[in-house]
Image: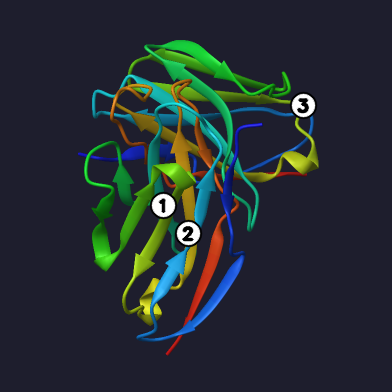
Amino acid sequence: DTEVTQTPKHLVMGMTNKKSLKCEQHMGHRAMYWYKQKAKKPPELMFVYSYEKLSINESVPSRFSPECPNSSLLNLHLHALQPEDSALYLCASSQRLGPPSNTEAFFGQGTRLTVV
Amino acid sequence: AQSVSQHNHHVILSEAASLELGCNYSYGGTVNLFWYVQYPGQHLQLLLKYFSGDPLVKGIKGFEAEFIKSKFSFNLRKPSVQWSDTAEYFCAVTNQGGKLIFGQGTELSVKP
C-alpha cells in the first residue's frame, strides 16, 4: 500500500468557520508534510513533521494549525481563513526526512479548499 | 536563497519529438533530486529520483534524467513524447534540512 489518503476531497467554508483537513498513511513513514498549491503553481511547503514532532514551519499564518496525533495521521486545522487561502492542500509522507536518508515523498490527491 | 529553477515555463511539442526539460538547484551539500508529474486533475506522481551512484537515472514511462553535480543540474529527457505525456512537470530537491522544495513547473503540451 503506497497510498496517502486525504479527506475531504472538496471543502467549502466561510471565513468564520472552523474545519479540519485529514491525512492518513499506513506505510510506516515517519515524516509527513503539508503543502499548499495554487492553480498553475508549484506546491509550497507549509509544515513538516518528523516522528510526530513539528520539524519545519514555513512561517505559515496561525490560522493554519497542524497536528500529528500519531505516526499515521496528520491534520490541518483551519480557522478564520481568507478567500486567498483557497487552494489545493496536499499531504505527503516519506520514510524519514532526507538526505542523508534516501527517501521519496508520496502525495495524496489533495483537498480542494474554497473559502467564501 | 536556496531555490530550484526550471528553465521552461511552457513547452509545446509534436508527438514523437524529443523532450528535455532543464532544472537547476542552488543547494549546497548532499541533496536528493526528483521529477514529479501532475496530469490534469490528478495528484503528483514520482517520475524518477536520484540519491547517489550512477548520475543517469531511468524512471517510469520512458523518462530519464541526468545529474551533473558540477552544474547543479538535473535535466529530464524523453526520446519520443506521446500525447499522453501532456502534463505539468516539477523538479524537486530535498536538502539536509529535510525540506522538499519544488521548481516552478513546466507545462508540457504534446500535439497529436
Q: Residues within 10 Å of mark 2 (few under 14, many from 20)?
A: many
Q: Which residue is mark 3?
A: A80
Q: Which residue is mark 2?
A: B89
**Residue B85 picture quarter:** bottom left
Q: Is A99 or A6 nearer to us in this picture?
A: A99
The residue at 35%/86% (across/down) is B16
Question: Considering the numbered disc 3 on the image, is that residue within a helix, a strand or a loop?
Answer: loop
Q: Which residue is mark 1?
A: B36
Q: CA distance from mark 1 to mark 3?
A: 33 Å
- As displayed, is residue A52 above or below residue A111? above
Quick one: which residue is furthest to the front in this view?
B70
Which of the image's four quarters has the N terminus of chain B?
top right
Q: Which type of secondary structure does the marked residue at label 2 adopt?
A: strand
What amino acid is found at the position of numbered circle 1 in the picture?
Tyr
Residue at the location (30% across, 64% down)? B63
Give the side of residue A95 with respect to residue A16, left or right: left
